[in-house]
Image (tube, grey):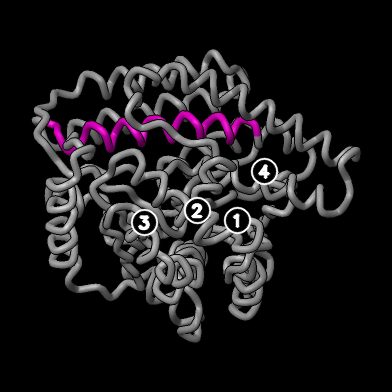
C-alpha cells in the first residue's frame, strides 16, 4: 500500500516528526516531516474550514494541501499520517474530514493513514509491531533530549548553542532509526541518545534564578511551535524556564485507556489483554534503558507514572469519566505544583473543549495548591499581544515563588 508513496508527518514537534520519519524509512517506507508551516498553511487550511474547526486541523490540513497544491507532489504518491482518537474531542474527526476535503479538491488518490488510540495505535498493518517499537524508542530518546534542552537553553552563554547541540542529538537518533541494520538495536539508539546528551552537556551555561513554569494543554498545540507562536521561547525570552511533558505521556495514557476498555468489556483473559500487557512491558523496558542515560541530568524533572498522576486530578476531573487531555492537564497541574513550579500555563487551540473544561476547574486547583497561578493561553493564529500576556503571567509567577517557602528558583 505504501510502496510507491511518501508518508508525510505533522510536526508535533519537529524533533519527533523527524525520528518517526526515520523509523518509517528504517522499515522500508519513504517518509519525512511536512515542510515548516507558513502563512500559506493558514490560507489553505482556512479555505476548507467553516471556522468551527480547531486550529490543529487548520494547520495539518493546510500543510498537506501545500504539498499537493503548491509543491506539486502527486496525490497518488502521497500518504498523510493523521492518527485519530475515540475520545471526547474533534480530533477524532480529523482523518475523515481531511479525506473528504482531499476528495473535493480532486486529490482522492492521496492516502490518509489514521491508526487509532482505541488499540494504542497498534494498527499500521504487516510489520507494524517493529515499526511501532522503533517509533516508541525514538519518542523516548527525543523526549529526554527535549527535557535537557529546556533545562539548559534558558541559561546558555552563547545563544543558539543549545539548539545546535540538540539538533545534533536528534540527527544521531535519525541516523540509527533510518538504518535497517540498527533500527531495532537498543544499544545503538541508546548510544545515539548519549551522544546527544553529551553534546548538550558541553553547552556553556551561566545559571541565574528563573521561575520554573510547568506546561500542559492540547498535545498538538503545545508541541507545534508554529501553532503556539513559539510560546516556550517566549516564556524563556522573558526569564522563565519551562517543564514540558513528553509526547510519550499520551502513549502511556492510551495504553491505560485500552486496559480500562478491556476490563469494561470483560476481556480480562483475552488475547487482546495479553498483547496489551506484553506491549506495555516492552515499552517500559525500553524506556527504562534509555532513561538511565539521563538520570543524572534530569534528576529534578521526574516524569510521573500516568495512572498515579491521574489520581491527583481525580477530585476535579475523574479520569474514568473525563477523558483525554482535560484529565491529563488538570492532573499534571497538581503534580507540577507538588514538584515546586512557580506557575502553570495551558497551551491549547481556541475553542478546544478539553481546555475549556480544564479551565473551568483550574481556579479550584489553584486554590487547593496554595494559589499557584494557572493561565490558559489559547491560539488560533491571530494573537497580537502574547509578549504582554506572558510578562503579566510571569509577574504573578515570580510573586508566588517569592512567598512560597518550598518553591526554589532553578
> Which residue position holds label 4?
255
Q: Give the range drawn in magenta.
A: 133-156
Q: Are marks 2 and 4 in contact (CB under 8 Å)?
A: no
Q: Where is residue 375 in the image (x, y as percent from the top left)?
A: 29, 63
Disc on the earlier residue, 2 or 4: 4
What's the distance in space between the residues labelled 4 and 1, CA to CA?
14 Å
What's the distance in space between the residues labelled 2 and 1, CA to CA?
8 Å
**Residue name at image x 61 percent, y 60 percent:** 323
Magenta stretch holds residue 24: no
What's the distance in space between the residues labelled 2 and 4, CA to CA?
18 Å
**Residue name at image x 31 percent, y 57 percent:** 345
> Which residue position holds label 2?
313
Of residues 125 and 204, the one nearer the viewer is: 204
Q: Where is residue 184 in the image (x, y as percent from the top left)?
A: 63, 22
What's the distance in space between the residues labelled 3 and 1, CA to CA?
19 Å
Q: Position of residue 302 (x, y in %)?
A: 41, 31
Disc on the earlier residue, 4 or 1: 4
Disc on the earlier residue, 3 or 1: 1
Magenta: main secondary structure: helix
Judged by depth in the image, the label closer to the viewer, 3 or 4, is 3
Disc on the earlier residue, 2 or 1: 2
> Which residue position holds label 3?
368
Q: Do the residues labelled 2 and 1 touch (CB within 8 Å)?
A: yes
Judged by depth in the image, the label closer to the viewer, 4 or 1, is 1
> Which residue position holds label 1?
319
Q: Quadrant of residue 166?
A: top left
Magenta stretch holds residue 151: yes
Quick check: 179 left or right of 170?
Answer: right
Amino acid at each position: 500500500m505504501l510502496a510507491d508513496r511518501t508518508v508525510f508527518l505533522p510536526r508535533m514537534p519537529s524533533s519527533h516528526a523527524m525520528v518517526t520519519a526515520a523509523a518509517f524509512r528504517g522499515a522500508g517506507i519513504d517518509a519525512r516531516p511536512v515542510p515548516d508551516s507558513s502563512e500559506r498553511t493558514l490560507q489553505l487550511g482556512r479555505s476548507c474550514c467553516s471556522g468551527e474547526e480547531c486550529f490543529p486541523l487548520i494547520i495539518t490540513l493546510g500543510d498537506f494541501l501545500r504539498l499537493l497544491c503548491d509543491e506539486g507532489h502527486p496525490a497518488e504518491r502521497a500518504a498523510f499520517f493523521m492518527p485519530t482518537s475515540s475520545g471526547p474531542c474533534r480530533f477524532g474527526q480529523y482523518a475523515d474530514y481531511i479525506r473528504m476535503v482531499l476528495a473535493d479538491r480532486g486529490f482522492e488518490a492521496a492516502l490518509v493513514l489514521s491508526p487509532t488510540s482505541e488499540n494504542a495505535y497498534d494498527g499500521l498493518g504487516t510489520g507494524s509491531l517493529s515499526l511501532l517499537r522503533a517509533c516508541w524508542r525514538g519518542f523516548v530518546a527525543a523526549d529526554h533530549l527535549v527535557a535537557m534542552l529546556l533545562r539548559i537553553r534558558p541559561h546558555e552563554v552563547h545563544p543558539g548553542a543549545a539548539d545546535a547541540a540538540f539538533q545534533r542529538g536528534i540527527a544521531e537518533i535519525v541516523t540509527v532509526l533510518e538504518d535497517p541494520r540498527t533500527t531495532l538495536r537498543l544499544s545503538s539508539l541508546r548510544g545515539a541518545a548519549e551522544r546527544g546528551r553529551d553534546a548538550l552537556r558541553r553547552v556553556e551555561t551561566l545559571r541565574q534564578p528563573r521561575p520554573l513554569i510547568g506546561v500542559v494543554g492540547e498535545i498538538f498545540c503545545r508541541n507545534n511551535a508554529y501553532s503556539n507562536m513559539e510560546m516556550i521561547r517566549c516564556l524563556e525570552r522573558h526569564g522563565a524556564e519551562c517543564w514540558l511533558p513528553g509526547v510519550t505521556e499520551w502513549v502511556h495514557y492510551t495504553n491505560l485507556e485500552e486496559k480500562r476498555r478491556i476490563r469494561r468489556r470483560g476481556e480480562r483473559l483475552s488475547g487482546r489483554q495479553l498483547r496489551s500487557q506484553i506491549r506495555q512491558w516492552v515499552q517500559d523496558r525500553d524506556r527504562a534503558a534509555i532513561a538511565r542515560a539521563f538520570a543524572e541530568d534530569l534528576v529534578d524533572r521526574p516524569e510521573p507514572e500516568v495512572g498515579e498522576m491521574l489520581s491527583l486530578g481525580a477530585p476535579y476531573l475523574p479520569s474514568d469519566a473525563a477523558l483525554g487531555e482535560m484529565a491529563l492537564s488538570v492532573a499534571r497541574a497538581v503534580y507540577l505544583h507538588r514538584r515546586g513550579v512557580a506557575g502553570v500555563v495551558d497551551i491549547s487551540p481556541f475553542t478546544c473543549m478539553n481546555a475549556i473544561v480544564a479551565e473551568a476547574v483550574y481556579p479550584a486547583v489553584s486554590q487547593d495548591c496554595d494559589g499557584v497561578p494557572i493561565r490558559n493561553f489559547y491560539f488560533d493564529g491571530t494573537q497580537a499581544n502574547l509578549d504582554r500576556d506572558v510578562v503579566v503571567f510571569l509577574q504573578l509567577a515570580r510573586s508566588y515563588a517569592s512567598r512560597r517557602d518550598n518553591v526554589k528558583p532553578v
